[in-house]
């Protein structure tokens, strides 16, 4: 048996025989043993694990989102969302034809979930508010506010406070109220940005005393490219190379308007921070040729820069402008498919950040390629790279999931070098698989190696990393990946009436890391 697996095997055995009555401390005799094994883990793989303590400034937490765990899709006055509609009317788009109707039933079981999170030693819980629970049709008016939805999140936030867990709250995790899609075309309309801003103001008003860390929109790239470009995600609009960019502009406006509202009306009183959560894989050049190096950089600019640049510099990345203009000309269009920002819009968007964010899961390879025919039009043709998965690296569940922890360190450095020395929060990182196993040494290894890469970035590269939110504390509805894609440190039995949560080995490991704030047996 490979050394790493052997250590993990003993580790899991210890976990199974350990009772942890209130999950507060693991420092009994078993705890000490676990700690020793934990130390051995650091020697168990060729790669050196960083032996520094996590600095106090680095907050450890866990994350998830309303549409993936709450269920209760039409209970408590909640309105229908684009994901409810998409999953129910287009089952062929979801791998197991499942829907988010019940999910983990966290709407009812939230108290248990908060205690699980507490038991994992998390300082932070990144959760999302379901827009359609607060304003069932999306639109704001005093009468439209759903008191049951407000009460649900108020109670939950109050309980978090009691547990001494800091909330980090996402206002939009892909769950647009269906009515806004039906009436306005969703994110294809700039009106949606205004309506979002009103919803954001309402949330700042309702929950601002409790919440100091706000996220406006999660992963605009997925919202726009998958939702309004390729159409693989709700609402399933297929307008490649057009809808995705219109959407990008509108979500940026939505974010900026919400940010400015917070600035003007709430910052002084509530002293919180607001950001948009942006995701990208890291792209490693397929060779050191200047073309491949440029292709990898271009990929990150298209994925991250498309949203990061407007927020940090007030406009799209130059390479994106150039590429879309070039392809648009080739297609015989008079204007670029990439919408421009007016000077007022640039001013509005520029500087709307209080911290940098990244959802990072995997690293992909990039090579340069020739121009595809102009009859083909998409975000990917604009980006113009060959994207591939390095066969030498281990894989997670879905095919795109190729594991290379150094990629996380590289992307953190890219962010710092591109946007400046800001506080950074890793708002998502975790491992999905399709096995559902309880004993998950592969997830422990993933978390450990990625945290080690974070420590390298902090201590060696002086990246100001202030937060790490592991995705996820429990399995969830993984969008088009359905319930088969398992990404939790707790297993959820979707067939049991009370959606039984069972602790995986990784949950125990994460707790140990959160409590000891160290990845090896002796830290400096
Ligand atoms: C999303 C999460 C999702 C995770 C894993 C991220 O893109 O923000 O909602 O669960 O990826 O697939």
Image (cartoon, rainbow, N blue to C red):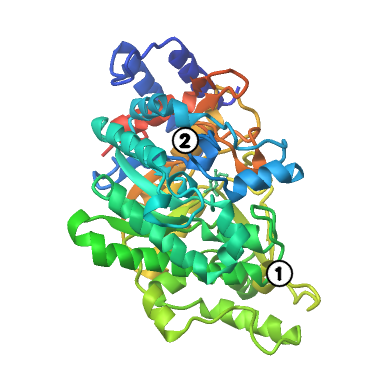
Residue 204, relative to residue 298: is it above or below? above
227 vs 56, left or right, is right
Can residue 462 be seen at all in this image of the molecule? Answer: no
x then y, percent, for residue 347: 37, 80
The C terminus sits in image quarter: top left
Look at mark 2 in the image and give the residue it sits on. Answer: 76
Residue that badge 1 annotates: 378
Q: Is residue 510 left or right of residue 102?
A: left
What is the spatial separation of the Cα atoms under label 2 and label 1, in whole angstroms? Answer: 40 Å
- Give me the residue at 64% from left, 62% from top: 228
The structure residue drawn at horizontal position 69% and vertical position 58%, both measured from the top left corner, is 231
At 42% from the left and 33% from the top, the residue drawn is 42
In the image, taking residue 223 as reference, residue 458 lies left or right, namely left
User: Which residue is at 42% across, 64% downward?
Assistant: 255
Give the side of residue 263 with respect to residue 457, left or right: left
Q: Earlier in the sequence, mark 2 or mark 1?
A: 2
């Amino acid at each position: 048996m490979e050394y790493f697996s052997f250590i993990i095997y003993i580790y899991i055995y210890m976990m199974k025989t350990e009772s942890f009555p209130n999950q507060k401390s693991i420092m009994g005799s078993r705890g000490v043993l676990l700690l020793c094994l934990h130390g051995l883990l650091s020697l168990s793989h060729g790669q050196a694990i960083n032996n520094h303590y996590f600095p106090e400034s680095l907050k450890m937490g866990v994350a998830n989102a309303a549409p993936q765990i709450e269920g209760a899709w039409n209970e408590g006055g909640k309105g229908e969302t684009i994901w409810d509609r998409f999953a129910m009317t287009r089952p062929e788009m979801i791998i197991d034809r499942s829907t988010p109707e019940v999910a983990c039933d966290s709407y009812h079981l939230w108290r248990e979930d908060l205690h699980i999170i507490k038991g994992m030693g998390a300082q932070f819980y990144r959760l999302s508010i379901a827009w359609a629970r607060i304003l069932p049709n999306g639109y704001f008016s005093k009468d439209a506010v759903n008191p049951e939805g407000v009460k649900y999140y108020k109670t939950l936030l109050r309980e978090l406070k009691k547990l001494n867990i800091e909330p980090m709250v996402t206002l939009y995790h892909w769950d647009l109220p269906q009515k806004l899609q039906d009436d306005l075309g969703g994110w294809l309309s700039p009106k949606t940005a205004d309506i979002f801003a009103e919803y954001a103001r309402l949330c700042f008003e309702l929950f601002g005393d409790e919440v100091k860390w706000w996220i406006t929109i999660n992963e605009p790239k997925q919202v726009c490219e998958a939702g309004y470009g390729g159409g693989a995600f709700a609402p399933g609009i297929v307008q490649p190379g057009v809808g995705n960019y219109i959407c990008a502009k509108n979500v940026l406006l939505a974010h900026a308007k919400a940010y400015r509202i917070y600035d003007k009306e709430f910052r002084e009183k509530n002293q919180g921070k607001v950001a948009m959560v942006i995701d990208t894989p890291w792209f490693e050049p397929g060779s050191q040729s200047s073309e491949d190096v440029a292709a990898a950089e271009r990929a990150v600019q298209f994925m991250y820069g498309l949203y990061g640049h407007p927020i940090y510099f007030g406009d799209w990345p130059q390479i994106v402008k150039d590429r879309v203009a070039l392809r648009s000309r080739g297609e015989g269009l008079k204007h670029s498919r990439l919408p421009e920002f007016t000077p007022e819009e640039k001013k509005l968007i520029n500087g709307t950040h209080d911290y940098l964010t990244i959802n990072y899961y995997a690293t992909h390879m990039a090579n340069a390629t020739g121009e595809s025919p102009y009859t083909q039009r998409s975000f990917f043709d604009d980006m113009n790279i060959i994207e591939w998965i390095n066969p030498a690296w281990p894989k997670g569940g879905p095919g795109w999931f190729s594991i290379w922890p150094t990629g996380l360190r590289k992307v953190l450095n890219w962010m710092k070098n591109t946007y400046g020395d800001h506080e950074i929060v890793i708002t998502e990182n975790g491992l999905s698989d399709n096995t559902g196993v309880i004993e998950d040494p592969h997830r422990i290894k993933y978390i450990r190696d990625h945290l080690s890469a974070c420590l390298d970035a902090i201590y060696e590269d002086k990246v100001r990393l202030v937060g790490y939110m592991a995705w996820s504390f429990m399995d969830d509805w993984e969008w088009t990946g359905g319930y088969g894609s398992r990404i939790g440190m707790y297993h959820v039995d979707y067939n049991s009436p009370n959606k039984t949560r069972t602790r995986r080995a990784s949950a125990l490991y994460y707790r140990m890391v959160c409590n000891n704030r160290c990845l090896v047996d002796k830290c400096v």
